[in-house]
Image: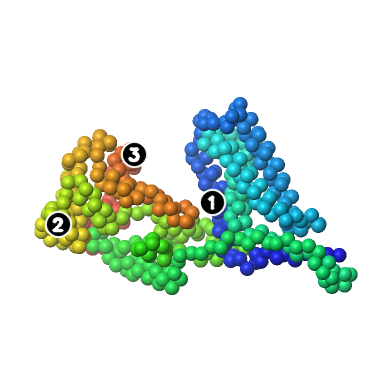
Amino acid sequence: MTAADDASGTQSRPQWGLAAVGGLGIAVAAALAGYAHASPGDGATITTLGFSALLPMKAWLTSAATALVIVQVLTALSMWGRLGRLQPAWAAPLHRWSGTLAFVITMPVVFHCVWSLGFATDSARTLIHSIAGCLFYGVFAAKMLSLRLRGLPGYRRVAVDSMGRVLGDDSLVESTPGDTLVTSIDAKVQSVVERQLAERIAFQRTQLDTVTGRRYAADSGAAVVLDAKTGRVIAMASQPTYDPDVWTGGITEDQLTRLYSEKAGTPLLSRATQGQFAPGSTWKPFMTAGALTNGYSMDTTLPCSSGFQVGNRVFKNYESGAYGNIGFAKALEVSCNTFFYRVGYNFWQRFGSDPADIDAKDPLVEEAKEFGFGSRTGIDLPGEAPGRIADRHWKQAYYESQKDYYCELSRKPQTPDTSDFDLDWGPQR
C-alpha cells in the first residue's frame, strides 16, 4: 500500500495572492466582454495566417487548443496523484508549456472575435459562445498567474503496511516553487502616508470654499512617495480605500457592490494609478520648460496681477495675490497663476487663435508629451491609466459630444446647490 503527501507548501502562500488571481480572471473576462460589446466589429478580417478564410483558421486553432486542454487535464491529474503511479517528472513542465501554447495559438481567434465580430447576442447560441469565450480567457489568465504565485505541487510517495506504518520511499516528485515577489514599499512610510492622507481629507471636509461658500467635498485623494534617484515607489495610498481581506475566501455581493459604488467613492479605483486629475500647480515647472524652449528666456518678466481676463471671464491668482512684474524663478516660487496664464495666452495668440484650426502648433502640448504626459509610466501594476493631454483635437471632440448637455444646463435655474460654476453666491450656511 502507498500513500502520498503534498510537498508543495502552497498553504503558506498569502491569501491575498489567491484573491488577486480571482480578481484578475474576473477583470480579464469583463474587459473582453465590455470592449467587444461597446465596439461591435464590421466583420472585416486582418489576416487568416495562411488559412483559406477566417472560419477554417478558427476551426484549426481551436481544435489544436482543445487537444492541449486535454493535455492540461491529464498532466494536472498526474501531478495531483489522481492517476495512480503515473507521475512522471515531465508532467509539471508539460502542464505549464501546454497551457502557454494553448493560450498563444488562440490569440488570433479571440482577436478576430472581439475586434471583427464583437459580443454577439442575436441568438442563444451566439450569446453562449461569446460568454464562454470571455470566461475562457478570464479563467486562463487567472490560472497562469496562480501557477506563478503558488508553484506546482510535488509528491513523496511512500510504501506503508496494513497498519499504516511507513516502510520506505516509493517515489518522489519534487515541487516547483512559485515566483518570489519583492515589493519596493517601505511599510513604515506606507503606514504614515495612509494615515496622513485619511486625516487630511477628513480635515478638508471641515473647511469652507471661499469661492462657492460651501464646504469642500474632499471625497477622494492619492499620495505617492518616490525615491528621487531611482524612481522606486516607497509608498502609495488611495482614498477612499478598503480592507483587501474582503477577497479572502470569496467576496459577498454586498461587499463587491460597495467597492464599485460611486456613493461610497468607488473604493476599488486606485486614485494613484487609475485616477485622472488636473495636475494643478505641479504643471508649472513643465510649462516653464515649454516656454523656455519656445521663445522665452530666464530674463523674461511678465505681470503677476491678481487676475487675468480672457473674454468675459477673469482668472484669478490664489487668494488674489499680486507680485508685480516677475520672472520665471519668482513665478515658480510664489506659484503665480496669472503669470503662466499670460504665457499660455501668448502661445494661443501666436500659433492658433482660430478655433477651427485644430492642427495648429501647440508648444505646451508638445512639451507635455516630451515629459511623458498622456502615456503610462510602466509601473508593474495592472490597470494603470495613461492620463490625457487636452489638446485641440480632444477639446473639439469633447465639445461636440457635450455641447447639447451644457446648452441644456444653461437653460436651467442656477442655485448654490446645483451649480459648479465660479459664481459669487455669498456665504452659505
Q: Which residue is mark 1?
A: 27
Q: CA distance from mark 3 to mark 2?
A: 36 Å
Is the C-beta separation of discs 1 and 2 under 8 Å? no
Which residue is painted at 20% across and 46% down in the image? 294
Residue at image location 17% in from the left, 41% down from the top: 349
Tell which of 12 and 334 is nearer to you: 12
Of the numbered discs 1 and 2, the one sitting upstream in the chain is 1
In the image, taking residue 357 as reference, residue 77 lies left or right, namely right
Position of 142 with respect to 428 (left or right) is: right
Q: Mark 1: give few (<14), some (14-19) or many (20+) Cα within 10 Å.
A: some
- The residue wearing badge 2 is 327
- The residue at the point 61 percent across, 40 percent down is 105
Q: Residues within 10 Å of mark 2 (few under 14, many from 20)?
A: some
Residue under label 3, please give it.
397
**Marks 3 and 1: which is nearer the front?**
1
Residue 261 appearing in the image: no
Dot 3 or dot 1: first in sequence order is 1
Q: Secondary structure at mark 3?
A: helix
Under circle 2, the secondary element is loop
Q: Are marks 3 and 2 in contact (CB under 8 Å)?
A: no
Identify residue type, mark 3: Ala
Place of residue 420 in the rendered image (x, y in percent of width and height, measured from the top left): 29, 53
Relative to residue 40, is residue 402 drawn left or right?
A: left
Tell me the SS state at disc 1: helix
Seen as rendered, the residue at the extreme top is 52
Split into 4 quadrants, where in the image is the C terminus?
Answer: bottom left
Instruction: Tell me the kind of residue under disc 1.
Output: Ala
> On the image, which quarter does residue 224 sit in?
bottom left
Q: CA distance from mark 3 to mark 1?
A: 29 Å
